[in-house]
């Protein structure tokens, strides 16, 4: 049998060899979620006869094009409801049982794919001797429309279909990855943004237990979930937009996808996402993690220094806001927390209301504080945690984007020479050094659960005394409690 042909439980798949790495693209891990399977949990794929040609990526989930995703290089043109495919990169389809790294892409639960150019696994496979898997999963209204409390009998778990797709992919990996040269007993899931937020939920999700051994969460934690009440409100907004009554939900199964996407276009950011539905997700991830459900899962958790800069940089309204409008924006976004934040940063520290201060506070609110909370919850349960912060400043747009959201991705994947990577890295002479540091740390963690390598300073585990954090930069270093000022204000413990 050819080295590119692998026998899976559902049939043979034929890949190709690229730059010395074996690659299989577009393997179905579940049945197409179309027609009567729309808004329902994934079902296993049907077996096939003959050989499945696995040399082209499968379509991504339906989504609306976004400027930011195009800038980051993950704005797929080929989309379809028939989207539940995965891709495998491996040094060889043999019996070597290599560590497996499973990538869950980001995109606010509404965008992205597992086949973005930046997620090419050749470098991980060739430099790290690991097997890499990237997946697609249902997004937006098709993946996270909570109809359970509208008609729960027919559409139970509809609000978490995207998560259940991820679980189905992990089950497929358990059943099949050994044939691709991987070890089903050393699976590391890693993801960024909504991908990392997904991982925070998977760590607490009963059906995902035992499907992975380690986790890396990049710019996402375990706090981005919706209550049933909020998720039902989002569903009712959509139902009103498409003029479908609560007792006639079957109409949703025949409705054109574009009409559904349009109906969801006015929902707030992260208005569609994982739901504490009481079934697939019985309780909040934070509660489940506090009970020790993931205490045996070593994890790397991190954020970028200037995460939120990506989201305000392209917003021209900041240049025209009056002082009164600026104040209203801060008050609206930070709500009941604003008086305390204002006292500390404006009154005591004499900072001024500005886009820079907004970016700093939103970065902490949306990304850094949830990451700290997750890390400390896990540590208190006895789990091993490694904490990092990505501080490298991108030179693009004259350096104004700084260490923005998703800017670590080309370095983690060592894909700095990909066409779209220049949008993030520019032509900086330090980009290769950064890639060597981060790529090797991720590889080391996949192999051993410990990210220490010769390329970086000694990286101690995280604890609630020192809060030691690796600051990735041209000269990476360890700093204790690097976000102490914001953390103390948020926690309300000035004596900490």
Image (tube, grey):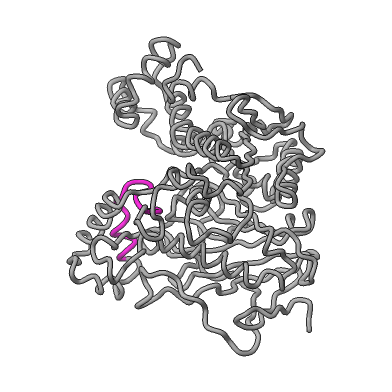
Q: Residue at x 59, y 24 (%)?
A: 481
Left or right position of 92 against 316: right
Q: Residue at x 64, y 30 (%)?
A: 469
Q: Magenta stretch containing residue 271, yes or no?
A: yes
Left or right position of 476 against 255: right
Task: Residue 349: tell me if it is visible.
Answer: yes
**Residue 460 place in picture, x, y as percent:** 71, 32
Which residues fall within the magenta stretch? 259-275
Residue 311 vertical position relative to residue 413 in the rendered view, above or below: above
Q: Residue at x 35, y 56 (%)?
A: 278
The image quarter in which residue 56 lies:
bottom right
User: Which of the two residues, 33 or 446, is positioned nearer the viewer here?
Assistant: 446
Dominant SS of magenta comes to loop
**Residue 451 place in picture, x, y as percent:** 72, 42
User: Which of the two residues, 260 or 161, is positioned nearer the viewer here?
Assistant: 161
Q: Magenta stretch containing residue 261, yes or no?
A: yes
Q: Residue at x 39, y 28 (%)?
A: 319
Q: How many marks?
A: 0
Residue 53 vertical position relative to residue 117 in the rendered view, above or below: below
The image quarter in which residue 36 lies:
bottom left
Residue 275 vertical position relative to residue 87 in the rendered view, above or below: above
Task: Residue 115: tell me if it is visible.
Answer: no
**Residue 345 place in picture, x, y as percent:** 42, 16
On-image quarter of the N terminus: bottom right
User: Which of the two residues, 180 or 16, is positioned nearer the viewer here?
Assistant: 180
Spot the residue most to the bottom.
49
**Residue 445 place in picture, x, y as percent:** 71, 47
């Amino acid at each position: 049998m050819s080295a590119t042909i692998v026998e899976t439980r559902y049939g043979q798949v034929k890949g190709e060899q690229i730059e010395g790495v074996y690659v299989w693209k577009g393997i179905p891990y579940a049945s197409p979620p179309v027609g009567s399977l729309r808004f329902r949990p994934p079902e296993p794929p049907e077996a096939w006869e003959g050989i499945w040609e696995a040399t082209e990526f499968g379509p991504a989930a339906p989504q609306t094009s976004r400027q930011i995703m195009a800038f980051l290089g993950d704005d797929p043109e080929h989309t379809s409801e028939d989207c539940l495919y995965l891709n495998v990169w491996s040094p060889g389809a043999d019996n070597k049982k290599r560590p497996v790294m499973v990538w869950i892409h980001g995109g606010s639960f509404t965008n992205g794919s597992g086949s973005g150019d930046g997620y090419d696994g050749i470098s991980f496979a060739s430099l790290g001797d690991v097997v890499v898997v990237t997946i697609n999963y249902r997004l937006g209204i098709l993946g996270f429309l909570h109809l359970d409390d509208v008609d729960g009998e027919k559409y139970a778990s509809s609000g978490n279909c995207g998560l259940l797709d991820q679980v189905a992919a992990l089950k497929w990996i358990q059943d099949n990855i050994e044939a691709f040269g991987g070890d089903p007993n050393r699976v590391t899931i890693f993801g960024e943004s909504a991908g990392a937020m997904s991982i925070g939920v998977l760590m607490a999700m009963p059906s995902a237990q035992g499907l992975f051994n380690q986790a890396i969460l990049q710019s996402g934690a375990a706090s981005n979930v919706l209550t049933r009440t909020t998720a039902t409100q989002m569903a009712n907004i959509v139902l009103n937009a498409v003029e479908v009554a609560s007792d006639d939900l079957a109409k949703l199964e025949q409705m054109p996808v574009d009409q559904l996407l349009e109906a969801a276009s006015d929902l707030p950011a992260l208005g569609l996402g994982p739901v504490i539905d009481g079934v697939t997700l019985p309780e909040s991830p934070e509660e489940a993690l506090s009970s020790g459900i993931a205490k045996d899962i070593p994890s790397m958790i991190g954020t970028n220094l200037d995460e939120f800069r990506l989201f305000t940089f392209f917003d021209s309204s900041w240049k025209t806001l009056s002082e009164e409008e600026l104040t209203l924006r801060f008050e609206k976004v930070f709500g009941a927390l604003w008086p305390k934040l204002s006292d500390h940063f404006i009154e005591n520290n004499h900072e001024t209301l500005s886009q820079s201060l907004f970016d700093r506070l939103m970065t902490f609110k949306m990304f850094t504080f949830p990451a700290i909370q997750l890390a400390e919850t896990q540590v208190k349960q006895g789990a091993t945690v490694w904490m990092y912060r990505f501080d490298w400043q991108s030179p693009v747009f004259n350096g104004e984007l700084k260490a923005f959201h998703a800017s670590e991705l080309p370095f983690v994947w060592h894909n700095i020479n990909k066409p779209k990577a220049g949008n993030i890295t520019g032509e900086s002479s330090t980009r290769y050094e950064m890639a060597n540091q981060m790529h090797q740390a991720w590889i080391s963690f996949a192999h051993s659960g410990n990210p220490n390598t010769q390329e970086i300073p000694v990286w101690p585990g995280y604890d609630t005394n020192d809060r030691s954090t690796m600051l990735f930069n041209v000269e990476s270093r360890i700093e204790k409690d690097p976000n102490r000022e914001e953390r103390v204000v948020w926690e309300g413990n000035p004596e900490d």
